Image (cartoon, rainbow, N blue to C red):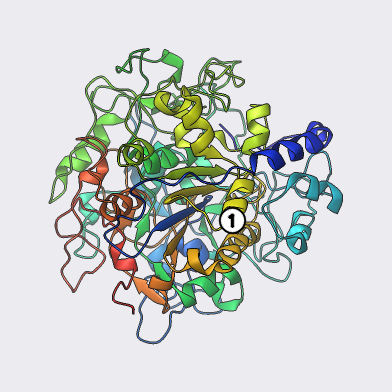
Amino acid sequence: MPHKLEGARWTKRVVVAATIASIVGSHAAFAAQLGANDDKTTSPIKHVIVIIGENRTFDHLFGTYIPKQGQTVWNILSEGIVDQNGAPGPNFAKATQRFAADAGASYSNSPGYKNPYYLLPPPGTAGAPNTASDTNGPPFASLSVAAAYDVGLYPGDLGLLLTGASGLASTHTVDTRIKNANDMLNGPFQLTGKTLPYDAYTGSPVHRFYQMWQQLDCSVANAKPWNPSGCAADLFPWVEQTVSAGSNGAPRPANYNNHEGATSMAFYNVAKGDVPYLKSLADQYTISDNYHQAVMGGTGANHIAIGYADAIYYSDAQGNPATPPAGQVENPNPQKGTNNFYTNDGYGSTSTNMGGSYTNCSDTKQPGVAPIVKYLSSLKQPVKANCQANAYYLLNNYNPGYVGNGTVDPTDDGPFTIPPVTIRHIGDALNDAQVSWRYYGESWNDYVQDPTNPLYCNICNPFLYSTQTMTDKLQREEHLQDTTDLYNDITNGVLPAVSIVKPNGLNDGHPASSKVDLFESFTKKIVTELQKQPDLWKDTAILITVDEGGGYWDSGYVQPVDYFGDGTRIPLIVVSPYSAGGNVVHDYYDHVSIDKFIERNWSLKPLTNRSRDNLPNPVVDPSQPYVPTNSPAIGDLFEMFNFNKS
């Protein structure tokens, strides 16, 4: 479904702010319950904090990052695609984007008849707010209203919630703040400039499952030693223009224009001052330039991957695979008479009773399945789809099975809610090992009181899908808490062994509804408060990443590991006394690497016999350090640390 902040109204939350504050205050009296085996680790790390922002690729944020002397990085600057000023470099053509044709009866993950754009379609605002408003923000018009909603920023940073509106006539129009918006060269372009400051809300490109397979345009015909998957990543604007997020089974509108254009090709110029706080962390600690979203597509599926090291499927009351309603099954085959406008794809609409987000990828007769399975099997090192028989997997965003109080979701968005699941997750493994954990979601206390709360990201919480967590009151209350509890636990010097932290929709950095500087400020508060507690800081690792690339283009290698992914590179910065030094690590990782780190550090087994944490750690040829020779393989993040540090 669309990001919860899109179109949200705020009056109701202002009225209940005082009540919520009292709930927060009473709940904060509980400190984290430690596990008997928290300290039984294979490394000096006793606490892991995972902070998950939203929707930015590696090149989108770090495309012009220059590491310290002696370190190397793969980005659009080092590849010569752009120069340090953000202008086209000598190898600009390496990023050429193409338009294609997919007007046949069946979907193609690598459509034919590709030709390069002469100029890219103009980038659009694609939902970015054009004015400040206390009832339709962000951005808000007054500091008092911003303060009533937000506890994730230091008071001095709350002003960021008042700034950044586009000032344009519409939230869906050509973004003329961008230099040469109507005369865009064919390749990546710097987003910021004289008329678009870093502190600006900007448009959000498409980021869904079958769309990303097409954007990456993977074919063995394009395979090279440095890119054995053959993913050309040359159809990003074309997919934005032809289908975007679909229309829930409705016909393609006349004069179709989604106002995305070439938004996917935008990047921030970190070499010229953009993304300053995350850059400072990369300079001081360790950054990966080979970390990936685990699933093609969007938010829900990638948070699920972190929780379960797998995808989840539509199930019956006993947890067995079942068949969802026909209107909820993805069908990316083009509608008749269109070029790539999918038959049934979207977040779900009660008006059409359609909105595909499930796929039975064990059956190659299902729409969209055969071309991807054929591609995976055609690789030099064939990759198994890893799809359980008769299972309809969730590929995009549907509501979790439960709401915050443990009851089954009352389906405030109609029928588009995945039934509760019983699949084993990382919290179950930690419980069995008597290792403590918590998921701290900003605005959780509000959400428990009101499941329609627009700030809390319910699809981001993998444990809201889980029967074993949500039907046990003690499990819910101990393991699912608010970020106010995180700050309190840090202040008290007591943290669980594993913490997953999710900002709310104001602070998560999601394009259109948030900004990167808000996510930076949210992250800075946690890092700063933790470093004030030397007894915690000395053995803690903070993993800072995002859920997925948001549909932004990236130049890095993508390794297929199964039907579901991987997707594009995204940032990962590890902040710890054991990761200091400004290093860049090239080992291949994705979100399940977080699970693998936790499992190795606390001597846990993989979650299930089919979950992705069973994959081996990468082995590489030194001449191609980004490409596992034993593919599919993902690392466990231990290379991000120097445990020989005295």
Q: Can residue 501 be seen in this view?
A: yes
- Figure check: 70 above or below 448: below
Question: In this rendering, would 1 be left or right of 63?
Answer: right
Residue 130 pos. (x, y %): 77, 49
Q: Name the residue under label 1.
A: 492
Residue 307 in the image: x percent, y percent? 39, 40
**Observer-nearest of 210 and 420:** 420
Q: Give residue 445's quadrant in the image.
A: top right
Quick check: 247 left or right of 624? Answer: right
Examine the rendered structure and indicate whether residue 36 appears above or below residue 102.
below
Q: Is residue 338 visible?
A: no
- What amino acid is labelled 1 in the image? Asn
Residue plotted at (51% across, 58% down): 265
The residue at 38%/72% (across/down) is: 578
Left or right: residue 503 versus residue 44 is: right
Q: Identify the residue shown where x is 58% and y is 60%.
A: 526
Observer-nearest of 455 and 167 = 455
Crowd tier of the residue under label 1, counting other residues whose Cα lies within 10 Å: few below 14, some 14–19, many 20 or above: few
* Nearest to the observer: residue 600 or residue 65: 600
Q: Looking at the figure, which quarter contains the N terminus?
A: top right
Outermost residue on the front side: it is 36
Percent of width and height locating residue 59 = 46, 64
Where disc 1 sits, the SS reads loop
Q: Which of 639 and 517 is in front in this view?
A: 639
Above or below: residue 365 compared with residue 52: above
Quarter the C terminus occupies: bottom left
Classify residue 207 as left or right of residue 5.
left
